Amino acid sequence: MAPTQTSESPADVKVDTAAIRAREQVTARRVVFAGSGEPLALIGAMVVLIAIFSILNPRFATIENLQNVLNQASLPLIIGLGATFVILIGSIDLSVEGVMGASGVAFVLLSANSRGGQDTGIWAWVLPLLLAAALGLTSGLIYTMLRVPSFIVTLGMWFVGFGIATILYGTDAYPELTDDTITLWVAKITFGLPNVFWVAAILTAIMAIVLRFTRFGRVALAIGNNEEIARSNGMPIIKNKIFIFIVAGLFSGLAGILATMQMGGTSNHIGDGYLFITIPAVVIGGTSLGGGKGGMFRTAIGVLLLTILNNGLVLAGVSPSYQSAVSGAILVVAIVATAWPQRGRLRIAK
Amino acid sequence: MSLSSKLTKVVSVAAAATLLLAGCTSTAGGSSNAAPLKKEDLVFVCSVINTTNPYFAANIEGCQTLGEKLGIPVEIVDAQGSSQTEISKIQAILAKGKKAVVFVNTVASSDAPVIVDAVKAAGGYVTIWWNKPDELNPADIGNNFVAFQKHSGVDSGKCTASMLSKAIGEEGGIIALPGVEDSTTSQTRVAGLKEELATNFPNVKVLDIRPSNWDPQLAYKNSKDLIAKYGDQIKGVWTADDGMQIGAMQAFEEAGLLDKVKFVSDGLYPPTVEAMKAHKGNDAIVGETFHRGYMASAIGLYTAYLAAIGEIDPSTLPAEKRDSMFKISCVTPDNIDEFLKWDSDVAGWVDTLIANGPWDTEPVPLVAGGPEVIKPEYK
């Protein structure tokens, strides 16, 4: 005989709230672990690389080389901060090298230089950064108002920036900064680390706070997750997107100025090669190209991983002809190893 | 009519028009005229890899000065580092109708055949500088490909290797930063470096060779890494051009090693001249080579011009005047002024070129015929 069923009204159901709370806590812990698992695995991959390179050449693990690695990682990291924000909203900024060229040439011409230019003081910083911000603003406006895909707009702005740099540069001799204190400031060691790394580290911390604790950062994440839902919730999508492109422009501009200081002079080509260090570093760090997932510290880890890889291969004496292939192969292995514990049924790779 | 068939029709008409236009263009410029051209029909075309590198900027200066002297208009082609841009801009100028006398500092060796074909089809005359495939011989193409010209890379490498070795006391470690790995110019300079060390300075050891792609920033990064790797074992730095030397010197200056290490390179760019004159880093730069962008372009353009107006018949020239190597000189801090005097009077130098002809003008007379061969042991 079947057991008699007793009917209970919903109000009579006894809810075991303690059990639900416990389950929620477990879920929350899992989410935290899942969120931090990937960066932890990347750090693990980095540690393995460091260990191998240190065995191959003991000079790898010296303070001097650490300072060298951090010095080299700084500019890609600064650019990467802006790029991370752009990628978080599901867009891309390809204008990096052009913006760097424009701001770098503007900076050197506004500083005391070998072409006879006079130091304009604070304007040597303000005007190039304004120029970079204006290029970012233009990208943002065209992208949002005219609804042109960001990779096309920013590809165009790359050449606009490069064109501005070429016009500003003209055909006179290579302009060098004549003030050695500016030139040597970038790599100068303060509290054990290069100045340029301090700049990058402080900016990383600020941008991480902005992303996590401000409405601006949360809206950016919401846009990347699902723009339609963000819009229907009344979030200021367009304003946010435009501002992100301005920020990305500013960071590229700053990198252009710092690169110019580092080299003691500049040409319109000062940004060459930076885009293709930065974007892979952001993605390797775990910021999704689809948007909505990622962060500043992840980018920092991605940049460091790539820098250590290239530095370590030189110190290990890998032939330059093989370096590109070896570097690529190690990266693929590192990423696969990193992503392996995270593979889930719903994490579809497209 | 449906939208798709309308679209098909429009595309067909556009394609037919394009074909017709292409046909007209190639017919117009199809014949290669052997008769001398009139001076007033000529235009000088000066194609450079970019306009901001000091060497290429000097190429432009040479073309413009020669153009002024001979009263011929000059069109500058800025390839912006792209073979595609270079070729399409040259083709656009050829299509304008005037007979082109062309100097090209090619972006890549593989551009040369395409450019030579286009110039020949348009009835112009071209001299290529620095890069071409070995199998592309001016004599095989005909009079329109007047000459291929360059300075010897091996001589450059030998010259700088010798000066660097002497400066570090003929023993110790050096690092080498070549340009783009598959660049012939860079390869020949590296071969000269290796040959000179093997032959005359066996105690000077190359610790590491890191191609730095003619890029000052990459040279800076590579130098930083190599300083971390070798520290004070590095007594000297050899770079394949002055742009990379700027980056390398910056890295050594930051490491506090600039006054302990010696540098040599090729090109004697303005910042290098400044550094040498200011005795930067306890006379860190000990050797350079002298050859000039304005000399290369003026020689190249003038050779092509003489063929265009019929003053020379390329088909009767000896082989070394069709595939040529011009002199390169070794410069030290002591003799630098002897060479800088040329830079202060570019117009005067071009006058001498016009008076003496393209093959006999100091300080860059013709010294040998090409192609330049790299000995297998120094590759």
Image: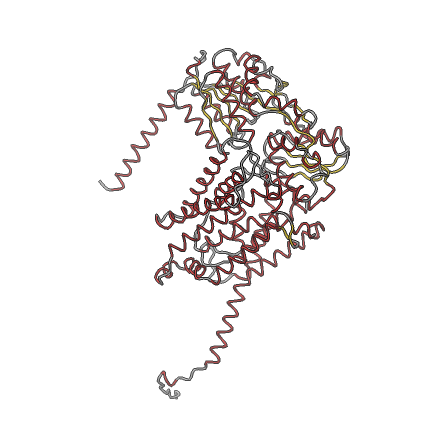
Q: Classify B303 as above or below A325.
A: above
- Counting from the top left corner in percent of width and height, residue B146 is at 52, 18
Compared with B13, A46 (above or below) is below
The quarter of the displayed image where residue A47 is located: bottom right
The one of A215 and B30 positioned closer to us in this rendering:
A215
User: Residue A247 at what x, y percent from top left?
Assistant: 46, 51
Q: Position of residue B12 (x, y in %)?
A: 30, 34
Q: Is residue B377 visible?
A: no
| Colouring mode (rainbow / by chain / secondary structure / one colour) | secondary structure
Residue A165 % position (x, y): 48, 38
Image check: B263 left or right of B137? right
Q: Residue A178 occupies which quadrant of the picture?
A: top right
The quarter of the image holding the N terminus of chain A is: bottom left
Residue at (36% x, 63% y) in the render: A233
Horizontal side of residue B78 vs A227, given as left or right: right
Inspect this view and state whether residue B174 appears: yes
Q: Camera-side residue: A239 or B38? A: A239
What count of labels does the image hold?
0
